[in-house]
């Protein structure tokens, strides 16, 4: 991997004349775009920012600002490989010293969040500044159940949203992500997600989490769990496989974050109907035994049998059991135990069981964020399990 200096070496003197913060805006409605630009000019001096926008009319409306065309903007609900390749190319071309990437619906971000993300990389105090959002209790549960606990346990990162869509990048972080992105774009897989936290951890780069407060998250292009969960978990499982040599080495796990009371537990409807999710799990327990028995060891299958017999508020999946299930699916993904599409599809009813359990836990008066932290801690505790299974899978064949 090239160093940051190599970027400067390939940039002409005229391009290096300006050295400030490159800000990439996702495609936004005009009103949101104006709101974001207004916040940006309040957060930073006009001389130190260069805005890359999708709408060519923005430059005409703001002649007092440096605004360039963002040539690669797609209506996507997450940052993709193509976005990171594009951001690095624009930073090189324009001599930026840091990058601020803002996702769709960025108009809902507070001024303090924009300033925090930008200042962190502008001052060279971190390589990756990643947003931490304050979301409603029912939002982002795929992240809470799988993405965050896995990233935290294996890569020792506190970043609560490893796929945050608002990021600050140092030049060397942008370069590393562009390199990872090019491996996908060269295979016509430009829409693949990247995992910035994992890349930063492997490279030994610094990570800073910025409190972004409440934010409106964009809706996925295909808001279907049967599409979203396999795509995200499959991408993360593949990244875990590529970086296995890193996370298998012993390293200090992060301390559990003490989540301040936020009142979210009061907002959860304790009468929520979890019956459809429980029914989906029970149906899968009957119909997917053949697949699950190829992936999960007997003790886990026994735990699922007990869960299938639970009713009402008693329907709760132990955190350690859930961690081992996810680890087993990650291993099966690596070993190609069965077709990966079928494998990830078989994870969906288990995820629904976790969601139903989470709702029950929260309905019992537990703060949602505190329960998610308990889940993440269980993934850390069970890390020796995945280490053993990963290194000696034949010993644990179900």
Image (tube, rainbow, N blue to C red):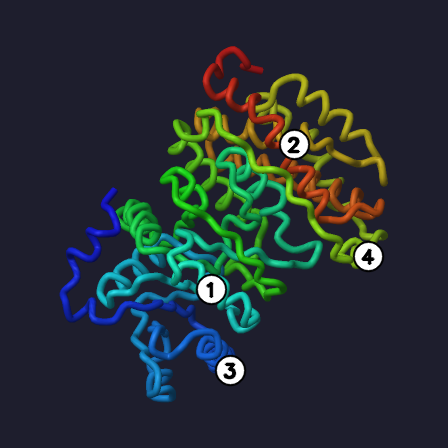
Residue 196 on image: x %, y %: 42, 48
Would residue 203 be visible to someone looking at this image?
yes
Would residue 188 be visible to someone looking at this image?
no
Q: Is residue 176 left or right of residue 385?
A: left
Residue at the (19%, 69%) spot, across then down = 15
Q: Residues within 10 Å of mark 2 (few under 14, many from 20)?
A: many
Q: Residues within 10 Å of mark 4 (few under 14, many from 20)?
A: some
Q: Earlier in the sequence, mark 4 or mark 1?
A: 1
Asked whether disc 4 touches disc 1, contact meaning CB atoms under 8 Å apart, the reply is no
Image mark for residue 266:
4
Whole-number angstrom distance, CA of label 2 to CA of label 3: 44 Å
Q: Quadrant of residue 201?
A: top left
Q: Earlier in the sequence, mark 3 or mark 4?
A: 3
Residue 39 on image: x %, y %: 50, 77
Whole-number angstrom distance, CA of label 4 to CA of label 2: 25 Å
Depth check, mark 1 against mark 2: the one in front is 2
Q: Earlier in the sequence, mark 3 or mark 1?
A: 3
Q: Which residue has dot 1 on it?
A: 103
Position above or below: 38 against 311: below
Q: Earlier in the sequence, mark 1 or mark 2?
A: 1
Q: Earlier in the sequence, mark 2 or mark 3?
A: 3
- Determine whether the residue tagged by mark 2 lies in a helix, strand or loop: helix
Residue at the (41%, 29%) spot, across then down = 244
Q: Is residue 64 left or right of residue 167?
A: left
- Determine whether the residue tagged by mark 1 lies in a helix, strand or loop: loop
- Determine whether the residue tagged by mark 3 lies in a helix, strand or loop: helix
């Amino acid at each position: 991997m090239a160093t940051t200096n190599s970027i400067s070496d390939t940039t002409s003197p005229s391009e290096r004349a300006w050295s400030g913060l490159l800000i990439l805006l996702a495609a936004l409605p005009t009103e949101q775009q104006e709101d974001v630009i207004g916040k940006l000019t309040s957060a930073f001096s006009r001389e130190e920012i260069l805005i890359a926008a999708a709408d060519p009319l923005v430059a005409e409306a703001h002649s007092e600002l440096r605004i360039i065309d963002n040539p690669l903007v797609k209506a996507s609900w997450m940052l993709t490989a193509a976005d990171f390749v594009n951001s690095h190319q624009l930073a090189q071309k324009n001599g930026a010293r840091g990058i601020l990437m803002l996702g769709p619906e960025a108009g809902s971000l507070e001024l303090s969040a924009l300033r925090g993300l930008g200042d962190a990389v502008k001052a060279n105090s971190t390589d990756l500044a990643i947003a931490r959002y304050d979301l409603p209790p029912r939002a982002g549960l795929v992240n809470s159940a799988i993405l965050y606990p896995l990233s935290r346990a294996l890569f020792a990162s506190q970043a609560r949203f490893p796929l945050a869509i608002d990021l600050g990048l140092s030049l060397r972080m942008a370069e590393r992500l562009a390199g990872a992105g090019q491996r996908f774009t060269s295979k016509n897989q430009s829409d693949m997600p990247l995992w910035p936290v994992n890349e930063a951890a492997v490279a030994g780069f610094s990570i800073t989490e910025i409190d972004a407060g409440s934010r409106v998250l964009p809706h996925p292009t295909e808001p279907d769990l049967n599409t979203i969960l396999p795509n995200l978990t499959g991408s993360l499982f593949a990244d875990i496989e590529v970086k296995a040599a890193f996370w298998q080495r012993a390293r200090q796990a992060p301390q559990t974050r003490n989540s301040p009371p936020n009142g979210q537990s009061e907002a959860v409807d304790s009468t929520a109907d979890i019956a459809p999710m429980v029914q989906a799990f029970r149906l899968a327990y009957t119909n997917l035994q053949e697949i699950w028995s190829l992936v999960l060891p007997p003790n886990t299958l026994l735990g699922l049998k007990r869960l299938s017999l639970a009713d009402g508020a008693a329907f709760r999946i132990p955190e350690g059991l859930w961690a081992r299930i996810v680890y087993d699916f990650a291993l099966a993904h690596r070993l190609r135990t069965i077709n990966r599409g079928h494998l990830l599809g078989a994870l969906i009813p288990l995820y629904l069981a976790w969601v139903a359990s989470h709702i029950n836990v929260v309905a019992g008066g537990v703060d949602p964020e505190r329960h998610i932290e308990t889940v993440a801690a269980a993934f850390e505790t069970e890390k020796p399990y995945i280490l053993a299974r990963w290194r000696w899978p034949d010993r644990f064949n179900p």
